[in-house]
Amino acid sequence: MRTILYFTAYLGLILAVVSPSHAYTYASPQSDPLIAGREAYLTAVNGGDWAAAEKALAAFKPDLDLLEAGDDAFAGDKGISAAFSDAIKNKDADAAKAALTRATIDQIDRRLSGASKNINTYQTASTLVASAQAFYTAMAGDLSTATQKTVSSNLQAALAAVGKPGVFGYGAQKPDPSALDAAHKAIMAALRPPSSS
């Protein structure tokens, strides 16, 4: 009986370690300000309520500052903050929505870049791919069916590429950096086609 209890406790510890809830929170998909504030921002923009749009923007402005500056995995996107502020200042709904799309794609790029950098740490890499998936889901309705299929299938490939730790060695799969890089490039090519640059 004691052996069973010890085994159960040990198994619980292992599962806690590999659980996404304990993973490195580069950005939790559930709480990311850009995702959380997306609806309020778009509602304000579509309704021409520019004061409300500016208020919604303030909630995720720190994230834009991070995108602007970049980090060790993401080169940065100079001018992303100005794209929002200029659109609101000019009361340009199309530009305001384009800025949100640009920032969302930047976040997907940043998460996948982070996953590549941390591919040998399953908890981190898998959480980052899941976060990229959350950003994609938020914007998927604005994309063509063909783009949706390309991005969705390559996100699944990216998740598979980070491997699996398994339990007690069973079901373990090694990470595949080349496959992750290929999936990342395919996703970015779909979301940032040459004609859009």
Image (cartoon, grey):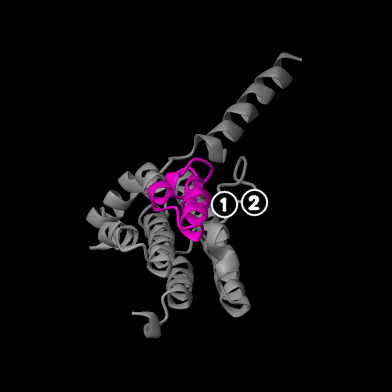
Q: Residues within 10 Å of mark 2 (few under 14, many from 20)?
A: few
Kind of residue sitting beneath label 2: Gly
Q: Are marks 2 and 1 in contact (CB under 8 Å)?
A: yes
- Residue 180: x and y, percent? 46, 66
- The reply to whether residue 1 is visible in this rendering is yes
Q: Is residue 192 left or right of residue 127?
A: left
- The reply to whether residue 174 is visible in this rendering is no
- Is 17 above or below relative to 68? above
Q: Residue at x 63, y 28 (%)?
A: 12
- Is 167 above or below relative to 177? above
- Residue 183: x and y, percent? 49, 70
Q: Residue at x 35, y 56 (%)?
A: 117
Q: Which secondary structure class fits the magenta region best?
A: helix
Q: Which residues are magenta?
A: 27-53
Kind of residue sitting beneath label 1: Lys
Residue 48 among those drawn in magenta: yes
Q: Secondary structure at mark 2?
A: loop
Q: Secondary structure at mark 1?
A: loop
Res 89 quadrant in image: bottom left
As measured in the structure, the alpha-carbon distance from the residue carrying label 2 to the one carrying label 1 is: 7 Å
Label of residue 171 in the image: 2
Label of residue 24 in the image: none
Q: Residue at x 38, y 84 (%)?
A: 194
- Is 185 above or below relative to 48? below
- Residue 164: x and y, percent? 57, 51
Q: Residues within 10 Å of mark 1 (few under 14, many from 20)?
A: some
Between 111 and 177, the one lying in front of the other is 111
Q: Quadrant of the N terminus?
A: top right
Label of residue 164 in the image: 1
Between 181 and 98, the one lying in front of the other is 98
Q: Is residue 46 left or right of residue 54?
A: right
- Residue 37: x and y, percent? 47, 47
